[in-house]
Image: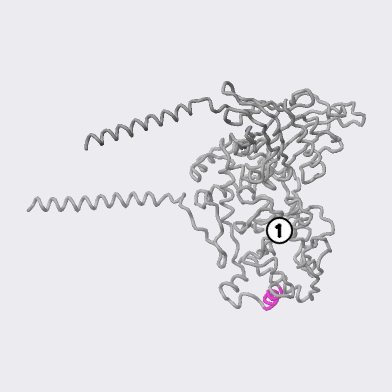
Amino acid sequence: MKKNIIIITFILFTSAVVFTGCKKDKDNGPAERSISFHLHTVVGNTVANYTSVFTDATGRSFTLSDCRYYISNIVFIKDDGTELPMTGKVLLANPATMKYEIGKVPVGKYKGFRFLFGLDSVTNHADPATYPSTSPLSYQNPNIHWGWNTGYIFMKLEGKVDSTAAANGTPDFDFYYHLGLDQMKRTIDFSTTAFEVTSTEDMELGIVFDLKKVLNGVNIPQENFTHTMDNMPLANKIVNNIPAAFEIE
Amino acid sequence: MSNKITGVLSIIIFVIISSILITSCRKDDAIDTGNEILELQVPTGFPYPDIPEDNQPTKNRIALGKKLFFDPILSRDSTISCASCHHEDKKMTDGLPVSQGIDGRHVLRNAMTVLNTAYQPNMFWDGGSPTLEQQVVAPIESHEEMDFNVLKVVERLKNHPEYPELFLKAYNLEPSPYTLTRAIANFERTLFTGKSKYDEYQYDKNMNALSESEKRGMDLFFGERAECFHCHGGFNFTDFSFKNNGLYLVYADSGRARITTLHSDVGKFKVPSLRNVALTAPYMHDGSMATLEEVVEHYSSGGKPHFNKSFLIQPLNLTQQEKTDLINFMKALTDL
């Protein structure tokens, strides 16, 4: 009887070790790799910055003093169509930062991905004070959140523009575009941009965001400001340019 | 035998000493009640307000919030505090048509009272802010009010000789946007008003508290003749809704529509409480009416035919006596 118990215990113990071992083998495999966006905020062919003078599509010169925008709700689509939402991952993009860590994804082939320019309505109306200071959703300086309607500014684009009629002067006139409100979010769809995550290296997806395209059709000196609500037509005009301003690099 | 006595004696002594020790311990605990959750003293007839789980009132939190409320440290040039536009002697309003912020800049709207704000389901004339906590940042970062940044305020508070310790005592955390907004909201939730002649009549059943004219005004107010109560009903004399009261044909300030973007919300503003209304002139979202007489005249006329005007605003054609009675009743809503 005692012998039996010992044998049974031995078997249980051994199988437990074996099972655990199996699991470990699987975990140890290079099943996942980090994935990042390599995001270039550009004006035409030049990477955006806060010192250079750029020109818009009509040749009018302008400078930038603030350019930040939210990217959220990133979803990777696996080859079999399964969607991998990167829940809770939010980026506050700016020209000086190019690499944005998204998270870890399984090795394999992907059909594509998509993300949101801006924030979903739940995130948009949460209290920024409840996030740790390292979060892009915490209060920022300069601010990127509207206290008066408790929503985030999805994109803040500010600078100076040449105000001369002939567009032959230097940037001297303020412009500021603050785009927000739930309805200003846009889905940026790269669902047919196939890529593969291999076990040998981390994945970086190259994306370009072209401010020249964002400002396409905007007469900057004439249409020099919107806080969205106070100039809805201009806000809509700019936001409607945004999906086409994102491209795969 | 003597051993036994010694034994009993030592037990008695032990019990006495330990009870003294325990009592003194208890006393020590009782001295610091700063972090005990308090029950707010709400006026008679008022419900107990909903208070967020993470910001229950304590003595330390209220004291910290009060200090911050009166401290111009919140503004860019340290000249404007919350109290700059919410004066205690004017029932937490400022007596101006629209408030004056930093560098003499004019704020968009008339300062609303902070009294009974614990009951507001949302903040501001347009309801743009969903909680008292989140509301705190708006005036700090508004260009026309304090023109500052909440992170810069926090930096100042962290370097202040007193605040870090007060924050630690109140929230066991350092100054941050979280603790700053919690503290001010915590204090604001303790500001009640609800002890007027009307309350003496209504809740204390003192039938002599109101004069005959005030009683006639009350009947007009709550009756179908003037129908004020449809919007200004309930313990706080507001239903907290947004209404267009036909003030203008074209609104310079779109009101609630600024938040919702809906055409059907243009010119709608939060129905304000009428408690202490005699002390909170001027009136309307833009402070465009200086006296209660003007206000009553407006409602008696039925207002302007704006497409969003509430169907409740209809010409009343009140007599002079009715107008006087109505105003006298409103004056009886002033705290004693």
Magenta-tinted stretch: B212-220
* Left or right of B254 in this view: A8: left
Q: Is residue B163 magenta?
A: no
Q: Chain of mark 1?
A: B
B239 vs A47, nearest the viewer: A47
| Residue A219 pos. (x, y %) | 86, 35
- In the rendered image, which quarter is residue B267 located in? bottom right
- In the rendered image, which quarter is residue A6 located in? top left
* Left or right of B81 in this view: A218: right
Q: Which residue is mark 1?
A: B270
- For the point 78% across and 61% down, the residue is B289
| Residue A198 pos. (x, y %) | 59, 24
- Give the class, few, some or many, for how many residues have Cα within 10 Å of label 1's Cα (few <14, many ≥20): many
Q: Is residue B218 magenta?
A: yes
- For the point 60% across and 28% down, the residue is A108
- Secondary structure mainly formed by the magenta segment: helix
| Residue B291 pos. (x, y %) | 76, 64
Task: Check disc 1 and report its element: helix, strand or loop.
Answer: strand
Q: Quadrant of the C terminus of chain B?
A: bottom right
| Residue B195 pos. (x, y %) | 59, 66
- For the point 84% across and 36% down, the residue is A218
